[in-house]
Image: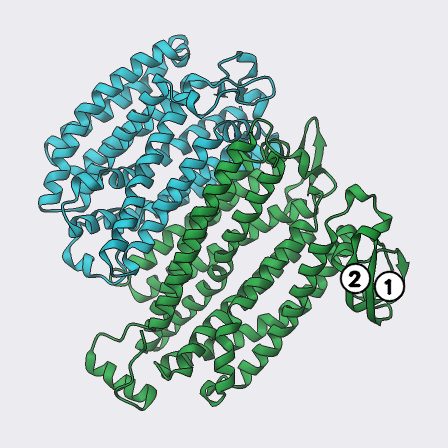
Amino acid sequence: MLEITWFVLWGVLWAIYFALDGYDLGLGTLMPILAADERDRRIMYNAAGPFWDGNQVWLITAGGVTFAAFPATYAALFSGLYTALMLLLFALILRGVSFEFRRKVDSERWRRVWDYCHVGGSFLPALLLGVAFANIFQGIPLNAQGVNEGGLLDLLNPYGLLGGVLFVLMFSLHGSLWLGVKSEGPIAVRAAAMAEKLWLALMVVVVLFLVSSAYFTQLFDNYMNNPVLFVVLLLAVLGLVQARVFLGKRSMLKAWAASAVAIISVTLFGVIGLFPALLPSSLDPAYSMTIANSASSQLTLKIMLGVVLVFVPLVVAYQAWLHVTFGHKITDADLEYEEAY
Amino acid sequence: MDVLLLSRLQFAFTTFVHFIFVPLTLGLSLLVAYMEFKWVRTGDEVYKRMAKFWGKLFLINFALGVVTGIALEFQFGTNWARYSAYVGDIFGSLLAIEATLAFFLESTFLAVWIFGWNRLSPKLHNASIWLVALAANLSAFWILMANGWMQNPTGFVLRGDRAELESFAALVSNPFAWQQFAHVLFSAYVLSGFFVLGVSAWHLARGSNVDFFTRSFRIAAPFTLVFALALVVQGHHHGSTVAKFQPTKLAAMESHWETMNRAPQYLFVIPDPANERNLVEILPIPGGLSMLAYHSFDAEVRGLRDFPLEDRPPVMLTFASFRTMVALGFLFPALAAWVWIRRKDPQSSPRLLRILPWVIPLPYIAIQLGWIVAEVGRQPWIVNGIMRTEDAVSAGVTAGQVGFSLVLFGLIYGLLVAVDVFLLMHHGRKGPKSSKNKEDDAQRQDADSGVASQGSPA
C-alpha cells in the first residue's frame, strides 16, 4: 500500500513539475516568435521572473523522490538516459543563468548571447522531457542488469519524437496563456492569437499521440481492465476544451488553469498506464523496473511520506501566494524596477 | 581513460565548481539579511543601499550555485548508478528532504525578495531574505548529513543487495556529519566575511563611498573574527572525529606511517609514499599528533603501514591539501584580528586596505582543499568501509558518453565561471547605486569622502 501511495506521489510530482516549469519553458521557446523588440523580450523574461526558479525545484524534487523512493529505477533511468539527461542539464543551466546575467552588462551583443541561451535552453528541455517520457511509456531496452542496451538515437523513434512534439506544444500553449495573464497591449494580443494556433496543433498531436499510444505502448491495458480510470483521460480532454473556451473569452488566467489541468492529466494518464512499472523494459517484462523490485524500505517510505505530506502542501501554499502576489500585469513601472530581469 | 576515472574527474570538477558558489551564498545571505534588518529598525537609507548592493553580488553568485547544484543530483544517477541503487534508501531520502525542506523555500523567497522591494512591507520583505538565509543553511545541513553518512555510515543495515535505513535518529545524529556541518558553515562564514571586507577595503583604499563601505566593514569585522576563531577550535575537534572514525584518512593527512604511542607532530614533512616513509621529518612536537588526535600525549596513532595498501587513500594529495588548509586556517584569525582592531576607522591602515582584496581568494582555496581532504582522503571508499568507489560507477555508461559530457562541462562551466567572476568584479568595483535624490547623493558623497567631485570609479 505504501509503495502504491509512493507510485502515485511520484507521478503527481512529475505532473506538477510539468504544469509549472512548463509555462516558463514555453515562454522561452516562443520568445523569438512573440517578442518584436527589446521591451517585449523583457516582458517575457519578467513574466517568468519571480517563478521560474521555484518551478524548477519541482524537477529536483521529482528526481530526488525517484532516488529516495525507487532507487533502482532512479539508477536505471538516469544512467540509461545518460546523454539525453546531460543535454537537458546543460540546457537548464544556460537557461537559468540567462535570467540572471542578461541585464548585468549594458550591451546589445551581450543580451543577444543570453537570449540565444535562453531560447535554446527552454526549447530543448521541453523536447527532451517529452522524448524521455514517451520512451518511458513505451519501454526502453533494459536488460537483466537494469542497463539500457539502446543509445541516444534509439530514443528518437517515431513515438518518442511524437512525445517531444507533444511536450513542446503543450508547454508553448501553456506559456502563451501565461503571457496573456501577465501582459497587456499588442504582445498580449499576439500571445492570445498564438495560443489559438497552438491549441489547434496540440489537439491534432494529442489525438495522434493517443492513437499511437494504443499502437506502440501497453498504456491502455490498465484502462481496459479498470475503465473507471478513463476519468483521467476525460479530465485531460476537458482541460484542453475548457482552455480553448476560456481563451475564446480571453479569460487568460482560467484558460491557463485549464491548460495546467490538461498537462497534469496527460502526465497522470501515462503514469497510470505504466503501473505497476516505473520503467518498463522493452526486452522482457521481467526486466522492468517496478514498484516491487525498486521501492525503498518501508521505514524510508514511511518517513519520506511524512515529510512530503507535511511540506509539499506548505510549498504549494507559499508558491500559490507567490503567484498571487506577482500575478499582476507587467507595466512600464515593473520594467523600470531596478531588480527586474 | 575508463568510465570510472572519467566519472570521478567529472564529479570532482562539477563539485569543485559548484562549491565555488555555495559558501558565499551561506554567509552573505545572513549579512544581507542583517543589513536590511538594520534598515527596517533604524530607517537609515544607507542600510537599504547596503542590502541592495551586497544583495546584487549575492544574486550573481547564487544563480550559478543553483544551476550547478542540479548537475550534482543528476550525476548520482547518471554516473554512479550502482551507488544510487545501493544506498538510495538512505542517501536518496536525505537529498529529497533537502529539496523539499530547503530548495523550495530558498528559491521562492529569494524571488519574493528580488521582486518585492515595492510590493511588500519592509518587515515582510526583510523576513523573506531571512528565510532565504535559513533555507540556504538548512540545505547545507541535509547535504552534509548525506556526505557525513558517506564518511561515517550510521543508522543502516545491509540487507540483500543494498543498505537500508534502520534508524533515522541515528542517521541525523551522526557525530561526524555534525562536525562536518559546523566546519562547512564556519568556513563559509569566514569566506563571506573576507569577501565583504575585501570589496569594502578596495573601495576604502580609493576613497569611494567611504561611509557606505566603512559601515559594511564594521558589520563584517566581528562576524569574520568570531567564525575564524571558532573554526580553529572546531577544526581541531573535527580532526579528532576523523581520527576516531577514519584512521586511514588521518594517517594520510599527517603522512604518518608507523603505528606508535606518543606520536610526534612534525612541523615540516616531505612524504615519500613509494617507500612508505617520509623523506624529511623535522621540528617534532613530542606526542603532538597523539594529543591532537586523541587528546592524550600517550595515545596510540595508527600508521599507514598498518593498513592494507588497497585500503589507503592517496597520501600526497591528502597530506598537502590538509597542511595548506590548516596553514590558511591559522592565517584567518590573525588577519581577522587585525581587521577587528581597525574596524572603527579602517582607512587608518592603508596597508590593511591594500592586503584585504588579495585575501578574498584564500578562503576559497582553503575550502576546496578541505573538500579534497574529505573526499580524496575517504578513498578508496565511496561509503567508508561499505562500498568501494570502483564498485559504484554506472554499468551501462560508456567512456565515450562520459568523455562527451566531461568536455561539455569543461566548456560550459569554464565559460560560466569566467562570466561570473567578471560580473562580480564589475559590479563589486562599480559600488552601490547612488540614492535616488541627486542632492542627497551629492551631500552624502561630500560627507563620505570630503571631496565633492570624487565619485565611484567604474
What color is chain A drawn in?
A: cyan
Q: Which mark is residue B293?
A: 2
Q: Measuring from the top left, give residue A261's x and y in whole percent.
A: 28, 30
- Say which quarter of the image contains residue B298: bottom right
The residue carrying pointer 2 sits among few (fewer than 14), some (14 to 19) or many (20 or more) residues within 10 Å by Cα, namely many
- The image's mark for residue B263 is 1
Residue A306 visible within the image = no
Q: The residue marked by circle 1 belongs to what chain? A: B
Of the 4 image quadrants, the one containing the N terminus of chain B is top right
Which residue is drawn at the image coordinates 76% and 56% (left, top)? B250
Q: Amino acid at mark 2?
A: Ala
| Left or right: residue B395 compared with residue B426 | right
- Look at label 1 and name its amino acid: Ala
- Whole-percent x and y of residue B418? 42, 57
- Dot 1: element: loop
Chain painted in green in the figure: B
Quadrant housing the C terminus of chain B:
bottom left
The mark tally for this picture is 2
Q: Nearer the viewer, residue B244 or B256?
A: B256
Query: Which of the colour schemes (rainbow, by chain, secondary structure, one colour) is used?
Result: by chain
Residue A125 is situated, as x and y percent measured from the top left of the image, at 35, 35
Is B266 on the left or on the right of A116, as rendered?
Answer: right
Residue A201 sits above or below residue B289 on the image: above
Marks 1/2 in contact by CB < 8 Å: the verdict is yes
Using the image, name the chain to which the residue with label 2 belongs: B
Q: Residue at x 56, y 23 (%)?
A: A147
Name the spot of residue A111 as percent of width and height, x first.
26, 53
**Which of B87/B10 is in front?**
B10
At 16% from the left edge and 46% from the top edge, which residue is drawn? A183
